[in-house]
Image (spheres, grey):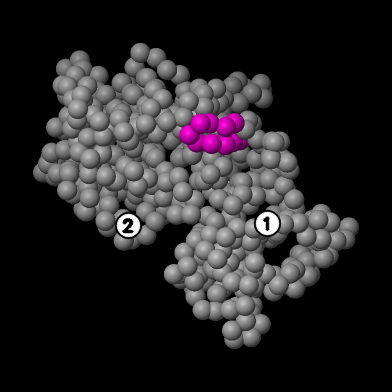
Amino acid sequence: MFERIVPSQFLSFSFPNPLASPGNPYADTLRVAVADSPSSTSNPSPPAIAAVLVHHRREDDWVFSTAAGHFQLLLFLSSPKLTISRLVLIGDLPSPSSSLPRPYHRSQPDGDGKLLDCFQESLIPLLLALCPKAAFLHGVPTIPFLSYEDDVIRSTPVERLVGPTAGEMLVEDVEIDLSPSSPELRRRLRFKKMPNLIQSQVRLLPESVGAGILRPEMGSLVQPNLSPMVSALFLNASAIDDAFGSGCVPWILCVGVGGGPLLASLRCRFGFRVLGVEADDVVLSVARRHFGLVEGEFLKVVVDDGIKLIEDYALERSKGNLFHAIMVDLDEEDPMKGIGAPPAEFLQVSVLVGARMALYPEGILVVNVIPSNESSYANMIKLFRKVFCELYELKVENGENFVIIATVSSIGSVAKKMKKEGGIYEKLKQLDCERFIDRIKKI
């Protein structure tokens, strides 16, 4: 079964630890998982094989214990210099799937460095046995051990749930390494079907001095794409200020709620009327119970298909129901395609036309984008140009996300003369959005 590369093949099995000893932090029985690249066209000849030793105590993390996480790791670790055809993960056996993941703390090293080198060396015969025949085309292959490090210092599971649309999900409290700044406590939401992607995260603040009780920060914008998305409001700030001045509270539609930090920020920090649309009622329950989302007269959330709602909007258009901005934060749900946004279902002319018709003439469509490649990004821009008047782009600091802003009418000349003043700009300034505003460029 391992003699050739089979696109998207995933297998896992138990294997005796070849170097079981008191000094080795890994157990006597190991979990070995093997995944082949989803793309058969990208496999080099001979195929490249790589391995990752899962950090001790992280074996429960869905990034390492699920097929979805494994495939996303394969895509993430591949590079122009190393196109991985088969990735092997080796670590301890995870906890039973019915239980909460074990807490994790990375402060302790995974044993003595020399012992770990010996442990990796002892795994080479196993790894060679897992190589396809084609890997031996030019002799015995070299199999590198790759490392995957994220910014999690420690994590504590809070609740594990299953939603009808999102599937299995996990709420966890984590301490994040922000070096050279001090670490930060956050609450996060992750889906099992896309475990490498953080769906929502907010800061955790002390309820009171010395109480030891933490609460989620209302309107927290620590998710990398949220501050840039909010900064897009600078482009139609004058129209929004005029609406407030006339006594008409502007409407914002948010498609994709997650934990609700974007909705809370738009309502609490700006005073907008906000309508949130989320496809999964369990996700909304999580937002209310674990992320502090509070609904009221000016903040409503509904369970619905947000993409279909936008597509159908043209049929129900009325002056009173138009929005000043539509913000779309939806992710691709197929792990084989890697981490991406928005989903293909959103990138349809009929959906974009619906979005345009749901906006005021001065309105904007703001979309979080994680392109799978340059070609798909270019095609998406072409699609937006067919429907909207002007397009603006903002690159997010993490190097992965873009924010695309599409306008119903021309604001180019207005944007050039736009002064950094007024109610909306001052609120953006308070949220440290100036640095993003300066990077918005017309494309």
- Amino acid carrying mark 1 in the image: Ser
Quadrant in which residue 15 is drawn? bottom right
Q: Which residues are magenta?
A: 161-173
Q: Nearer the viewer, residue 272 or 414?
A: 272
Q: Quadrant of residue 260?
A: top left
Query: What element does badge 1 sit on?
Result: strand
The residue located at (64%, 23%) in the rendering is 213
**Residue 37, horizontal then vertical, whole percent:** 52, 63
The residue tagged 2 is 376
Q: Which of these two is toward me, 294 or 256? A: 256
Residue 271 lies left or right of residue 186; in this view the side is left
Verify whether residue 169 appears in magenta: yes
State the image coordinates of residue 17 (x, y, percent, origin top left).
81, 61
Tell me where residue 122 appears, x and y as whole percent: 78, 70
Asked which secondary structure carries label 2, the reply is helix
Sequence-first disc among 1 and 2? 1
Q: In the image, is residue 189 above or below residue 289?
A: below
Is 382 situated left or right of 374 in this image?
A: left
> Main structural element of the magenta stretch: helix, strand or loop?
strand
Query: What label does residue 259 carry, if any?
Result: none
The stretch drawn in magenta includes residue 62:
no
Mark 1 and mark 2: span between their CA atoms? 33 Å
Residue 25 location in percent, x, y? 80, 55
All told, the count of numbered labels is 2
For disc 2, the neighbor class at 10 Å (few under 14, some 14 to 19, many from 20) is few
The mark lying in front, picked from 1 and 2, is 1
Tell me the residue that label 1 is attached to: 12
Q: Amino acid at mark 2?
A: Ser
